Amino acid sequence: MSTIEDLVAAGAISRIEVEMTGREQAQRLLYGTPGFIEWLRKVINGEEPEGRVGQATAAEQIDQLFHAYLSGAPLIHVRQFRYIRAEENAVWELKTPDARIFGWFMKRDCFVCVFGDWADKVKDHDLYRGYRIAIRRLRRELGVDHTLCVQGVNPGDVLSV
Amino acid sequence: MTSFQFDIGGRARNAGRFIGRVRDELLKALSERKKDGKLSQQELATKLEVHRSLINRQLSGEANLTLRSLADLAWAMDMEITFELKKPVVEAGQNQPVMTSTIGHGQIKYIDGGRRSRACQTLAVSPMASAEATAKSLR
């Protein structure tokens, strides 16, 4: 049975960190697949969606989202404007005005990012189903579909704060 | 690779997190008002004499928030705004704030148990420059 440490050692996932300020400490864990990290590198290098709607750049939006998640901040104030949404197949979506990140929770407060994409592209091409299937396939390939995967669809199932 | 630091640089980080914090405060206030049963988004739009879609786009982060629109939203929700700029407090044992972008320069090293090295002091952005950057991000 694979553990999180096994997955990291095998290079299947890497821990993702952002700068924490002052007395902040990470309250949650964030990981990404190599493909997702590659996407993050492009974002750091300035890749942006066509017709960005957010006031912040895509990189700033994602940093803010990661920081909110890692620092243990609430990700849902008002249901309509939540940062996180459950999909089918134990897949979750993290949202910024311009970006969508799909992945799954290995444990409570322990998310793996698998795909990053631009919100308009995901919506225009209805990529939700494809990402869901690909994430489930990846979990099976890694042998963690039944062991390192939270099945609940309520935010309280995957986030402790 | 066992870990990846998503480092967008101090200036961008400051701007993005500030914009996010403002939005979160608005959403928190709206959530409280909704729980009180005192204000819906439609009532907010009616009070401000704007279309509800504008309120939605502002709260979702899809429309720019000016200082005026921020003040208007706070007024409509019957909330006070507090705003303060202050020097960061650096104490031994806490995370050290990155004062400049580290993109292309490698990570800035801090030594002396919390006090910054001379090199870092030279690179440090003055409080005034920091305030100007914040002001620019508000425009």
Image (cartoon, coloured by chain):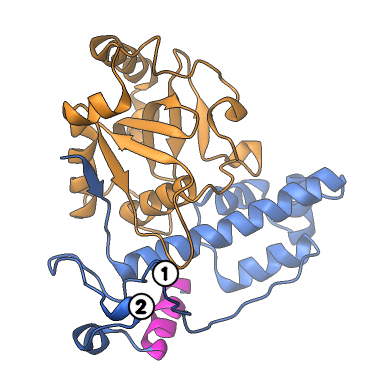
Q: Chain of mark 1?
A: B
The type of residue carrying mark 2 is: Gly
Residue B93, labelled with which disc? 1
Within 10 angstroms of label 2, few (less than 14), some, or many (20 or more) residues?
Answer: some
Q: Residue at x 70, y 67 (%)?
A: B72
Chain represented in blue: B
Q: Is residue B134 visible?
A: yes
The reply to the same-chain question for discs 1 and 2 is: yes
Q: Is residue A34 left or right of residue B14?
A: left
Q: Quadrant of residue A19?
A: bottom left
The type of residue carrying mark 1 is: Gly
In the rendered structure, the colour chosen for chain A is orange
Q: Nearer the viewer, residue B124 or A125?
A: B124
Q: Secondary structure at mark 2?
A: helix
Residue B20, labelled with which disc? none
Does B34 appear above or below A8? Answer: below
| Residue B103, position as x, y percentages in the image | 18, 65
- Marks 1 and 2 sit apart, C-alpha to C-alpha, by 7 Å
Count of numbered badges drawn on the protein: 2
Q: Secondary structure at mark 1?
A: loop
| Residue A156, position as x, y percentages in the image | 61, 29
Work out whether mark 1 precedes mark 2 in sequence or the reverse, and give the earlier one: 1
- The stretch drawn in magenta includes residue B16: no
Q: Residue at x 50, y 55 (%)?
A: B63
Q: Quadrant of residue A101?
A: top left
Q: Mark 2 — residue?
A: B114
Q: Nearer the viewer, residue A13 or B58?
A: A13
Magenta-drawn segment: B127-138
Does B110 appear above or below A131? Answer: below
